[in-house]
Each structure stands twice: as C-alpha cells, then as structure tokens.
Image: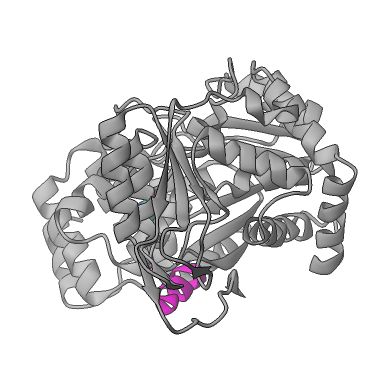
Amino acid sequence: MNMYDLISKKKYGETLTNEEIHFIVDGFTSGAIKDYQMSAFLMAVCLKGMDKDETIALTMAMAHSGDMLDLSAIDGVKVDKHSTGGVGDKTSLVLSPMVAALGIPVAKMSGRGLGHTGGTIDKLESFRGFSTSIPTEKFIENVNKMKMAIVGQTANLAPADKKIYALRDVTATVDNISLIASSIMSKKIASGADVIVLDVKTGSGAFMKTLDDSIALAEAMVEIGNGVGRETYAVITDMNQPLGNAVGNSIEVAEAIQTLQGNGPADLLEVSLTLGSYMLYGAKKAVTVKEAREMLERTIADRTALNKLAEFVRAQGGDDSAVFDTELFPKASIQKEVLADKDGYVTRIITDEIGMTSLVLGGGRETKDSEIDLSVGIRIHKKLGDKVKAGEALATLYGNDAAKVSAAATRYLKAYTLDQQQPEAVKYIYGIV
Ligand code: URA
C-alpha cells in the first residue's frame, strides 16, 4: 500500500477500504505520510466525497490515534452532550446538573473557548478555586459518587484529528461534511460515552450557516455514532441570535444558575430541556421524551439541579457560594449601554459579531494562549422580533478597559439590523435527527 496510489484512487472517486483509511491516518499521525500528500488526499475527499463506511473508518482511525477514555468503571449508562458551538451557549451548565440530579452519570470532557464562541471550562473557572485538571481516577470517582464531573480535554484525545484539522484549516478543506462529522465524532467516541446527544447549531453564529447544511451534518454524525454502537441523537437548534441574554463567562454562569432557579430565558430553557430529554431517554431513564422533560422540569422546581451544581463545584475545588448568590461573581468596573440609532424591529443579528464583541471586551481568546477576563460580558436587552425606539438600549456591555468598551459598542451596534416590518417569530428548535 502506498499513499500515491490511495490519493489517485480517491481522485477518481473510488471507495477506500477500512485498511486503506487506517493506513493513511496512522501514517500521517506518525509522520510517515507528509503534509503535501495528506493535503492532496483531503482535497480529493472534498471533490469526490466519502461514503458512510469510509466516514466511519476515518472516524474510528482518528479516535484510536490517541487515548480512548475507558469509562467502564462508572456505573450505569454514560451520556454526553456536544454542541457544534455558538454564542451565549451555556446549555451544558444547565442540563448537566439536571440530568445528574436524576441519577444519570454525566462524565464530560469540555474545551476552552476560541474565537467568537466561549468554552464551558473557562466559564466554570468563574467559581473561585474550581479546577478541571483532575486525574482520571478522581474524575471517575466523582461521577460514581455524585453523577457529575467535567474535565478539560487531554492533549492526547484524537491527536490525528488535531493534526489533520490544522492542515484542513490552511488548505481550504474544512467544509466537507464527512471530514467535519468524522472530526467531531472521533473526539466524542474517544471520550467514552454510551449515549451521545449532539446540539447542531444553525444560523449566523453557527459553524453551519444554513439549515440544509446543519441537517446534513447532523445526519452524518448520527449515522457515525449509531454505526459504531453509540446511541446518538442530534437536535438542530437556532443560532441566528445568541442563546439567552448573557454573553461572556461569569455572566453566562449567572444566567445558567438563574435558569436552574426557574428564572431563565425561554430559549435557553427550551434548548436545555430538549437536549436533556434526549439524554434521559437515551439512558432509558424515561420511556418517552415527554416523560423525560417532565422529570427535568421537576429538578428545577424542587431545586435538586441547583443543589447538584453546588455539589459538583465543591467536589472540583470551587467555592459554591455564588451558586446561591450570583452577585458574588467578579464584577467589571465599566458599564456602557449600546443605544439604538433609530426606531424599528430587530430583524437580523450577526451573531458571530456579538461573540466577537465579547472577545473585544476581553472575554474571549484570539489565540489559544490568550488570557481571558471572566468578569466582562454583554447583557442583551433586545432580540430578534423585538420593537425598539431610537435611544433605547440594545444591550449593556461590561468591561474593564474604556477603549475596549468603546470599540465593542461600535461593533455591537453594527451587528443589528432594524427594519419597519415585524419579522416572523423565531424558532428555537428546527428538528431532531
Ligand atoms: N469542529 C471540529 O471539531 N471539527 C471540524 O472539522 C469542524 C468543527
């Protein structure tokens, strides 16, 4: 077997075998196959595509290129949720304690934020002393004891994907459904869960901007998951505007806590309940999705989910007092309202620009080594379909640097379109795959 022949085979649209795909992934990971050959192969995949079996083979080859987390020491069906990334997306912080409060183990591996989207790990560090660098044994012990633990992604999770993604990024080969689906699923499969619930975002702040592309990605990922024995569901959710009304780090954790207290925004609650319902249903804790939803709603009403969050924060070294008083989170020194420059209805929000506004304030990372300021962020007052008067506040920005706050305000205003015609009502969920 040699790489030249395999590139040629794909160039002519032929189907590669499982062994051939493993040969390519293993060879590239070890360095035996060079960047220029892998680049040619990836471009051939973009032009000729891969079928279901090839996509599964690619996923499994990448998953097995590094550590495969063994969660067999955890009792019960392990469930995990993954989002393709969005602005203001704090659903993990809402649904993980709800699901864990019902006795279903949530063993989560999460990432840090990069670019316009935030990361769960950064947000959790808003709790003083909280750490996600816990050894695997402690992670497993915590999940067994209280059904919930979250760790940072290890460097050796699907290293082949990391190396291939870096190459795709500079060779215009990112936007192929098989390559995207296998990249995401390789990491999820290596993370060890039995049931995987995917939140596939669609819209102006999402990786997939159109509904058709989002459905295609959701179908490809569900096919991979089910094809390798992991029960997988995908929920397609809206990202034409930020989720909830808070964007940043501490401010998002505070909003997640308010949701667990029964005072959360409708869109965040709906998306969290829907994803959480499929987690419970997949774990066979409920016979129907409707029953699962009612169980989750009860964890808010009786505060068991809120108490579970506090227990989880304490178990990972954090100070849980902010769970019961969100005023204790770090506060930014400057507040500035972004005022509407005319009357109208909000008809469009360029959502990734809202994420970039948070980044400009200091709440996000331009490169993976950037420091972030957990106290800065955005409180959104007007969302799609809302009526606005000139001079009314669209949002309040929180920052610690006057020049950054001013630049962020200009950016925020430009992300909004105000028109005279009231737009159609927004959807939170577009479908389940
Ligand atoms: N996210 C991933 O992890 N991989 C991709 O290919 C695209 C988005």
- Left or right: residue 2 versus residue 107 is left
Pick whichever, 383 or 70, lies toward us.
Answer: 383
The percent position of residue 25, horizontal first and vertical second, equals 29, 49
The percent position of residue 328, horizontal first and vertical second, equals 64, 23
Give the extent of the magenta segment.
Answer: 209-219
Q: Main secondary structure of the magenta part?
A: helix
Coloration of the structure image: one colour
Q: Residue at x 46, y 45 (%)?
A: 396
Q: Is residue 216 magenta?
A: yes
Q: Quarter of the image for the C terminus: give it.
A: bottom right
- Left or right: residue 14 versus residue 234 is left
Pick whichever, 74 or 14, lies toward us.
Answer: 74
The percent position of residue 11, horizontal first and vertical second, equals 16, 72
Q: Quarter of the image for the N terminus: give it.
A: bottom left
Determine whether 139 is above or below 419 in the image.
Answer: above
The percent position of residue 223, horizontal first and vertical second, equals 53, 69
Determine whether 153 is above or below 208 in the image.
Answer: above
Pick whichever, 36 or 305, lies toward us.
Answer: 305
Numbered label tally? 0
Pick whichever, 361 or 13, lies toward us.
Answer: 361
Q: Residue at x 54, y 23 (%)?
A: 330
Q: Quadrant of residue 415?
A: bottom left
| Residue 58 seen by the camera | no
| Residue 226 seen by the camera | yes
Q: Residue at x 13, y 60 (%)?
A: 40
Q: Is residue 180 magenta?
A: no
Q: Residue at x 18, y 68 (%)?
A: 44
Determine whether 354 is above or below 134 in the image.
Answer: below
